[in-house]
Amino acid sequence: MRHGDKINNLGRKTAHRHALLMNLACALIDNKRIFTTLAKAKALRVYVEPLITKSKEDTTHSRRVAFSYLKRKETVSELFKEVASKVANRNGGYTRIIKTGNRQGDAAEMAMIELVDFNEIYSNAKSSAEGTAKKTTRRSKGAKKETTAKAKKEDTAEASETAEA
């Protein structure tokens, strides 16, 4: 029985699962976005987010810890240079999982997992939407009466001007 077992084993033995997550994490850090199954994406999030948190503090110890998880020198240096500088002011939630439907062959649920701060399209659209959206407030019925009273005054003023002419 698997009561209380929080780890998704992904149908693999331990060594195979660690190798899979290591390769997925390296691909995510290198490419900033990958397509995989939903279960693998959820397992990858748990694997890679603590590494990104460790990359904020650029010490020898944190680099060695990251290297023990990733086993690829170029990926570790990219994690500590590019990724850490982008997520420096973020307190977590470095990845985003978006479901993309089912795979054609076996109908497995597919998902795209990406690093949040590297999606320029989404962040630009969100910031422009926030900038252009005008904040509206609810008005009471009394405000309507005031605007109609102003409109009536303008109409009488125009009528008097035309009458004088």
Image (cartoon, helix red, strand yellow):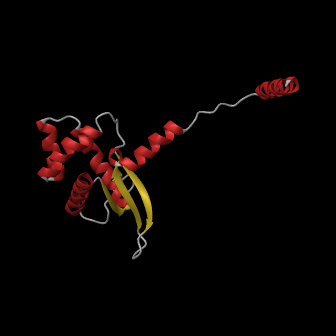
| Front residue of this view, candidates 152 and 116 | 152
Q: Position of residue 146 (x, y in %)?
A: 79, 24
Residue 129 lies, with reference to residue 40, above or below; the image says above
| Front residue of this view, candidates 18 and 161 | 161
The residue located at (14%, 53%) in the rendering is: 71
Given the current orientation, which residue lies at the most extreme bottom position? 105
Residue 125 lies, with reference to residue 41, above or below; the image says above
Q: Is there any visible trace of residue 1 in the rendered image?
A: no
Picture quadrant of residue 38: bottom left
Q: Is residue 10 left or right of residue 164?
A: left
Given the current orientation, which residue lies at the most extreme right position? 163
The residue located at (85%, 27%) in the rendering is: 162
Given the current orientation, which residue lies at the most extreme front position? 165
Picture quadrant of residue 124: top left
- Looking at the rendered structure, the number of numbered marks drawn on it comes to 0
Q: Is residue 7 left or right of residue 149?
A: left
Q: Position of residue 117 (x, y in %)?
A: 34, 44
Q: Is residue 106 left or right of residue 149?
A: left
The residue located at (36%, 49%) in the rendering is: 119
Quadrant location, the N terminus: bottom left
Q: Position of residue 9 (x, y in %)?
A: 31, 60
Q: Is there any visible trace of residue 21 in the rendered image?
A: yes
Residue 144 lies, with reference to residue 102, above or below; the image says above
| Front residue of this view, candidates 158 and 22 | 158
Picture quadrant of residue 157: top right
Q: Position of residue 86 (x, y in %)?
A: 28, 40
The residue located at (72%, 29%) in the rendering is: 139
Quadrant location, the C terminus: top right
